Amino acid sequence: MTAWILSLLIAAVPPGLTPRETEADAIVRYVGIAEDAAAVAAGPEEGALIAAIAVHESRLDLAVDQGLVRGDGAVCLMQLQHPPPGAESDRRICFAEGLRLARQSLGACRALPIRERLASYCSGRCELGRVRSREIVDIWQRLLWAHPFPSRARS
């Protein structure tokens, strides 16, 4: 699953687009991101969800990944508002907490249309964050459609 998640990351945010990181360095870092996402995800859908959230929230930015930049007080590639200890320096902790919050949001906001069920992840409440939820779900769906997991490839 790691290689597949890596392909999603590269498709979503081509490496080497920033002067702070060479393409080769970005690819090495993306491999680590993919390994950590695969280690946390229960399957391909969750791996793609982690990728979609990280792409939307941080654009896989090197400075965010290194903990040098925080957005609105949020940390790590998943931009967690209330991160558990270690999330800023350990991607697996970051991804595990982000995935826990995403699952919680999908359940808590189940009365909303599917594209809005990550509203709680985005804002802390189902009533807010619906636009950002739609953006994340759209990325998630595009990644899954354009890059199906090999065992589920379209004919």
Image (cartoon, rainbow, N blue to C red):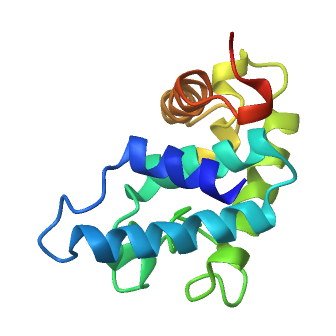
Residue drawn at (17%, 65%), measured in percent from left and top?
A: 18
User: Can residue 84 be seen from the camera position used here?
Assistant: yes
Q: Quadrant of residue 92?
A: bottom right
**Residue 24 horizontal side relative to residue 115, left or right:** left
Residue drawn at (62%, 48%), measured in percent from left and top?
A: 4
User: Can residue 124 be seen from the camera position used here?
Assistant: no
Q: x%, y% of residue 16?
A: 22, 63
Identify whether 141 is placed above or below 58.
above
Q: Quadrant of residue 23?
A: bottom left
Identify whether 73 is placed above or below 118.
below
- Residue that extends furthest to the top in the rendered view of this protein: 155
Residue drawn at (65%, 43%), measured in percent from left and top?
A: 48
**Residue 78 horizontal side relative to residue 106, left or right:** left
Taking depth in this image into account, of 16 and 116 the one nearest to the observer is 16
**Residue 23 horizontal side relative to residue 139, left or right:** left
Q: How many marks?
A: 0
Identify whether 89 is placed above or below 54.
below
Residue drawn at (65%, 69%), measured in percent from left and top?
A: 35
The quadrant the C terminus occupies is top right
**Residue 19 horizontal side relative to residue 31, left or right:** left
Identify whether 100 is placed above or below 91.
above
Q: x%, y% of residue 57?
A: 46, 53
Q: x%, y% of residue 55?
A: 45, 50
Q: Quadrant of residue 100?
A: bottom right
